[in-house]
Amino acid sequence: MQPALCFADSVQRSLFDPQHQFTLAAGTTCSDGKSSVTLQSATAAPNQYAATRSMLSADHLQNKVVQVHAVFNAQNVSVGAGLWAGAYDGPKQIALTNTENNPVRGTGANLSRTLTLLVPSHTTRLVYGVMMKGPGTVAVCGLDAYFSPPATPDKAAEPLAMQTMRFALDAVRTYALHAPLIDWETRTQPLLDLAAKGSVDDVYAAMRRLLADLQDGHSFVMPPVTRRRMADRTPLMPSFQKISSDIGLISIPSFTAHAPEALTAFIQTAEQHFAQAPEIRGWIVDLRGDSGGNMWPMLQALKPLLGPNDLGFFENRAGKRSSPWRAGTQNAAEHMTTPDLSHLPVAVLIGPHTASAGEAVAIALKGRPATRFFGTPTHGQTTGNKSFRLPDGGLLAVAAFFELDRTGRRYEGPIEPDEVQVAPDMAQNAAKAWLEQSLNQHPVR
């Protein structure tokens, strides 16, 4: 096992105390012979805070893992205390981590805390220290930063966090549309080192930073607890509103459920709306609340309006296209029968909350005859994600495909409406007026 290297604390500690409620002083002698750092306040409000700051040059530390460790002795700490560390490029903070998920509270002795920071490649200095919020006193011993050289990898004995990081790195490098933006030679090993030493929060924070560097605005990662919480949500269902005697509105919400019964209920609800309104001759499809999820049940829900046609395509970074999208060809309840309304005029409402799979549905409606879009530009996540179950039970979604409409047009960024209407009521009114005009000019039976 290689030894950890401790950095000499050559810069005097300073106190950041924006509300002037805290004091910083040398305390009692610690077991290493040094004086403890004592941070205290008797007057701070629960939302007031302070932090000590010690600075280190980042020379030779870029793309390496640094750990900060300290032992706390606390007295009447009301809100919480802990450690923090940040990386800076000149005056700009480019990375930050802290132990706020494991705070020191109340009264207690010998409370050990450690945090882990992956130093970005363009870091010029590191700043770290003790932080405290609210009243109380902490005397901190052994406050130091350490750099541990990476150990020789042993994949067979890798902890779960390293397996998770390695899986994520392989998936992103293999499938992400913008994977060439990442310098994999310099990024891979530091991220594996971080996974070997850091907490679960550190690992997921590092994966989020990696995905952000893809600059696709769509890739994301979700830890196991969040994934389970999302899966347990009760899904919203499509809703119907009769606008006039011959114009109806169907709202398609986001859909993130995975249970087969939820998927069937989503599709059947939409089918019932269409079946119960045979007199409707023009439809408004409201996608303004569709922030994403699974596009296939959304397309199946709109099958009466979409028909059996090719609706769009995925295209990977090598330019290879998928088979065409079709309503009802994937994850569909094939026994259902729906009316063919693909000849009716359709007005589509979109806005900034139309995102991801919601935008894929909008793209599927692009190129449809007698169709016009109203509202404001969509969110701009017009890529297809490839999802992976991580070894620790988390979820990784990588923007792996461009999205093309039925004409072959590729969408990159927000989808623009044909008619901009910022106010929601004005957008719906404009859609209704266009449908009325269309029905008067071209009566549909």
Image: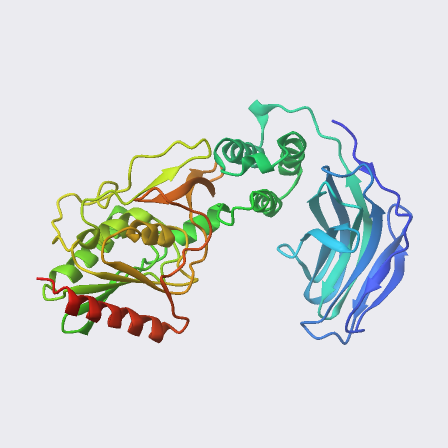
> Residue 262: x and y, percent?
26, 52
What residue is shown at x 34% (from left), y 71% (from top)? 427
In the visual, does 219 lie left or right of 312?
A: right
Query: Which quadrant of the figure contains the N terminus?
Result: top right
Query: On screen, 167 above or below 105?
Result: above
Residue 140, quarter of the rendered image: bottom right
In the visual, does 396 lie left or right of 151?
A: left
> Residue 361: x and y, percent?
32, 52
Looking at the image, which is closer to me, 140 or 304? 304
Considering every residue shown, the one lying at the far front of the view is 441
Q: Is residue 241 visible?
A: no
> Residue 168: x and y, percent?
52, 36
Looking at the image, which is closer to me, 124 or 34? 124
Query: On screen, 2 above or below 84?
Result: above
In the visual, does 164 lie left or right of 75?
A: left
What residue is shown at x 27% (from left), y 45% (from top)? 311
**How was this image coloured?**
rainbow
What residue is shown at x 39% (from left), y 31% (from top)? 320
Looking at the image, which is closer to me, 401 or 145? 401
Query: Which quadrant of the figure contains the C terminus?
Result: bottom left
What residue is shown at x 29% (from left), y 46% (from top)? 296
Residue 159, quarter of the rendered image: top right
